């Protein structure tokens, strides 16, 4: 998520939230990878598509949709 989030940054997130919108930063538990911090690209049929802030970095997770129940938290503050 460079340049907006870097290694060793601390974030505060809520695991109780009312909605997720396009552009929100979320923590998502991705099978076989773990918890990642990504931005919501779009939402369709209770599934989200993710992307990062570094547009030069490519990841295979950017091609997939993930269930909303995999979202572990919504980031609301970064230190």
Image (cartoon, rainbow, N blue to C red):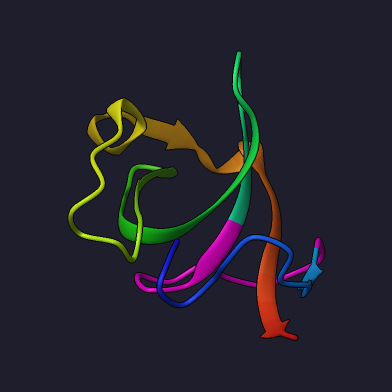
Question: Could you say where residue 64 lies in the image, as x and y percent from the top left?
Answer: 30, 29
Q: In this view, does 49 lie above or below 79?
A: above
68 vs 38, nearest the viewer = 38
In the rendered structure, which segment of residues is drawn in magenta?
A: 15-26
Q: Is residue 5 above or below residue 64?
A: below
Query: Which quadrant holds the N terminus?
Result: bottom left
Tell me if 34 is positioned left or right of 20 in this view.
right
What's the residue at 77%, 70% (across, down)?
13
Quarter of the rendering containing residue 62: top left
Quarter of the rendering containing residue 70: top right
Does the magenta stretch mainly form a helix, a strand or a loop? loop
What's the residue at 44%, 44% (across, down)?
46
Q: Inspect the magenta stretch and tell me whether residue 24 lies in it.
A: yes
Q: How many labels were placed on the picture?
A: 0
22 vs 3, nearest the viewer = 3
Tell me if 74 is positioned left or right of 60 in this view.
right
What's the residue at 35%, 70% (across, down)?
22
Question: Could you say where residue 28 lies in the image, as x and y percent from the top left?
Answer: 61, 44
Residue sitting farthest toward the top = 32
Residue sitting farthest toward the left = 56
What's the residue at 54%, 71% (across, down)?
5
Quarter of the rendering containing residue 54: bottom left
Question: Could you say where residue 79 lies in the image, as x and y percent from the top left?
Answer: 75, 86
77 vs 6, nearest the viewer = 6
Q: In this view, does 13 lie above or below 41?
A: below
Q: Inspect the magenta stretch and tell me whether residue 67 lies in it.
A: no
Tell me if 22 is positioned left or right of 78 in this view.
left
């Amino acid at each position: 998520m460079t340049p907006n989030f870097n290694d060793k940054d601390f974030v505060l997130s809520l695991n109780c939230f009312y909605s997720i919108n396009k552009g929100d930063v979320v923590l998502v538990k991705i099978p076989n990878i773990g918890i990642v911090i990504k931005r919501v690209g779009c939402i369709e049929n209770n599934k989200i598509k993710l992307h990062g802030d570094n547009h030069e970095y490519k990841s295979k997770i950017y091609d997939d949709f993930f269930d909303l129940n995999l979202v572990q938290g919504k980031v609301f503050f970064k230190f």
